[in-house]
Amino acid sequence: MKKKIFSGVQPTGNLHLGNYLGAIKNFVALQEGNDCVYCVVDLHAITIKQDPKLLKSNTLETIATFLASGLDAKKNIIFNQSSVSAHSEFAWILNCVSRIGWMNRMTQFKEKAGNNKENASVGLYVYPTLMAADILLYDSTHVPVGDDQKQHLELTRDIAQKFNNDFNCDGFITVPEPLIQKEFSRIMSLKDGTKKMSKSDPSSQSIISLNDDKENIVSKIKKAKTDSLPLPSTKVELKDRPEAGNLLGIYSNLSENKIEKTLTEFKGKNFSYLKDQLSALIIEKICPIGEEIKKLLNDKNYLISVLNKGTERADLISSIKLKKIHEKMGFLS
Ligand code: AQP
């Protein structure tokens, strides 16, 4: 059956291998035979202070990354969140449906706010209700995300169910399913296999950026943290070896092989052999995307035209749904 897909990426710059393997690669696979909506979530980005000039260029770069990775602008709805006002309007309604206790459990807020919670933006705290609004406005049935967003998706399901209960409209808001890869769904930092690969990591050595050139990739993989043992032959042995697990997981994901096959290929070998093979594979799969991003960024008018068309289509769908939501809530229209 055709799925209704929704997902988003923040235009916070420096998109990396984690964003690609955890999310964008799946967006591309899902575009065949499904109705897909892919959004550059700039309203989410501003939950942490952004430089307006950079936000603009990062938004274009994110669109360019979608297209360079293989998303078809005709098949999919690709647009920018702030251009479609239904997202923030519905988010406010969902702020009133959601419970403070639910928000208090969100680990992303705790991680991003750190020790300085009092100084974090209110937007960062209610980030999950905006995410729920994005997804639920399009009656999405499935949401492809990286493993780090699993908790927010579970909350989205709770919010959808509560809305349907509160307004006595069972099935009106579709309760979406997460689409998260089963294995190695979280790509880890090259400098610490227990920490997520993250755009905001202060060390550029911890991430492979989609814009990295061959020399950068070879150098970053060469310097990636390892342990002192030869590579193992079973998944069980990977449990206490986060760096080995991460590098082998990236290799498996990029080569589209199960981890068991990758383990058989590398068992007993040392890290330098794996690193050579992995660098070559990343260069083969990622560098063409980086080159295409550069090309697309030279044609800003084209990128803006893609956004404008997507905005029109997204606006139409979401405004119809929002009108129905208003009726359920008793708003006079
Ligand atoms: N390390 C990761 N492994 C797998 N998936 C990942 N994603 C992000 N990091 C990893 C997935 O990428 C999609 C878009 O992410 P985002 O840009 O919207 O936000 P994020 O999760 O906050 O990304 P970062 O890199 O961690 O940014 P910062 O440093 O700003 O917090 C999502 O589907 C996400 O799961």
Image: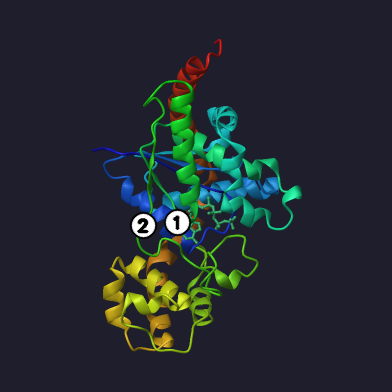
Which residue corresponds to the image point at 47% horizontal and 76% vertical from the top-left?
A: 243
Which dot marks residue 147? 1
- The quarter of the image holding the C terminus is top right
Q: Is residue 298 visible?
A: no
Query: Element under label 1?
Result: helix
Q: Is residue 94 above or below residue 272?
A: above
Q: Position of residue 34 (x, y in %)?
A: 30, 40
Q: Earlier in the sequence, mark 1 or mark 2?
A: 1
Which residue corresponds to the image point at 28% horizontal and 73% vertical from the top-left?
A: 260
Residue lying farthest right? Answer: 119
Q: Is residue 246 above or below residue 81?
A: below
Q: Are marks 1 and 2 in contact (CB under 8 Å)?
A: yes
Residue type pointed to by label 2: Gln
User: In front here: 267 or 237?
Assistant: 237
The residues bearing labels 1 and 2 have C-alpha atoms spaced at a distance of 8 Å
Query: Element under label 2?
Result: loop
Q: Residues within 10 Å of mark 1 (few under 14, many from 20)?
A: many
Residue 94: quadrant of the picture: top right
Residue 246: quadrant of the picture: bottom left
> Which residue in the structure is indicated by mark 2?
181
Q: Is mark 1 within 8 Å of ligand 1?
A: yes
Q: Is mark 2 within 8 Å of ligand 1?
A: no
- The quarter of the image holding the N terminus is top left
Residue lying farthest top? Answer: 332
Left or right placement of residue 103 versus residue 166 in this view: right
Residue type pointed to by label 1: Asp
Left or right placement of residue 34 versus residue 212 in this view: left
Q: Position of residue 287 (x, y in %)?
A: 44, 66
Which residue corresponds to the image point at 47% horizontal and 89% vertical from the top-left?
A: 228
Q: Is residue 153 above or below residue 23?
A: above
